[in-house]
Amino acid sequence: MAETGGTPIDVDRLYRRYAPMVLRRCRRLLRDEDQAVDALQEVFVRLLTHRDRLHGRFPSSLLYRMATNVCLNVIRAGRVRREDDGEGVLEDIACAADQESRTLAGVVLDRIFRRERPSTREIAVLHFVDGMTYREVGREVGLSAGGVRKRLREFRARVLARDTAGAEP
């Protein structure tokens, strides 16, 4: 048990209480049970590894954000691996209809977010995918609701500017 900022981090207690929430988050983002379970474990391994630098004041927010980041990393890594090995192509062919729309969406999103900070992608996922309000997103990422609104407005403007200029997003 580590103590920084006054509140001790009890990883075992947090796992018992918040693992179902983290697993739901991972399932929603990854849409694959095995990957979701692996991501759940990775979240708590990271929590255990970094518990000396963390505080336990808002554990659900911390774990929710960690789960989001781990899942986004898994998604990015999966796309890279799928391009590198031929097995991903076979899987894509087997699930063509649904996979085609996901693949297209993934390519478009990668292009849109290519020049953006990772935190912008996280903010966009929390707001547009998870349906969180500006205030809720702000609590998760450490910004005010106005800061989230401004970041998303500037992001939209950059995307629209690239789109109207005919440049690759």
Image: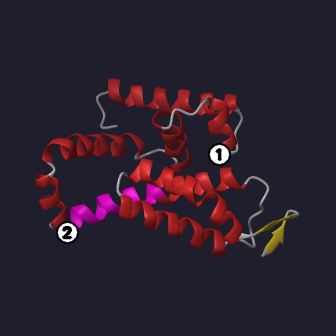
Image coords of residue 92 (percent x, y): 16, 54
Where does the image place residue 78, in percent across and percent down from the top left? 32, 61
Give the SS element for disc 1: helix
Question: Does residue 121 show up magenta in the picture?
Answer: no
Image-quadrant location for residue 135: top right
| Percent coordinates x, y for residue 165 in the rendering | 33, 26
- The image position of residue 145, as x and y in percent, is 68, 31
Above-or-below relation of 102 to 81? above
> Mark 1 — residue?
141
| Camera-side residue of 15 and 68 | 15
Dominant secondary structure of the residues highlighted in magenta in the image = helix
Which amino acid is tagged 2? Asp
Crowd tier of the residue under label 1, counting other residues whose Cα lies within 10 Å: few below 14, some 14–19, many 20 or above: some
Q: Which residues are magenta?
A: 71-85
Relative depth, front residue between 29 and 167:
29
Q: Tag 2, which secondary structure?
A: loop
Report if residue 79 lies within the magenta region.
yes
Residue furthest right in the image: 6
Vertical side of 25 occupied by 153: above or below: above
Q: Quadrant of the N terminus?
A: bottom right
Q: CA distance from mark 2 to mark 1?
A: 35 Å
User: Which residue was labeled with disc 2?
Assistant: 85
**Marks 2 and 1, the one that precedes in the sequence:** 2
- Identify the residue at horizontal 52%, vertical 47% (top origin): 117
Residue 163 is drawn in which quadrant? top left
Instruction: Identify the amino acid type marked 1.
Output: Val
Image check: 151 left or right of 56?
A: left
Q: Residue at x 40, y 47 (%)?
A: 114
Q: Residue at x 35, y 42 (%)?
A: 109
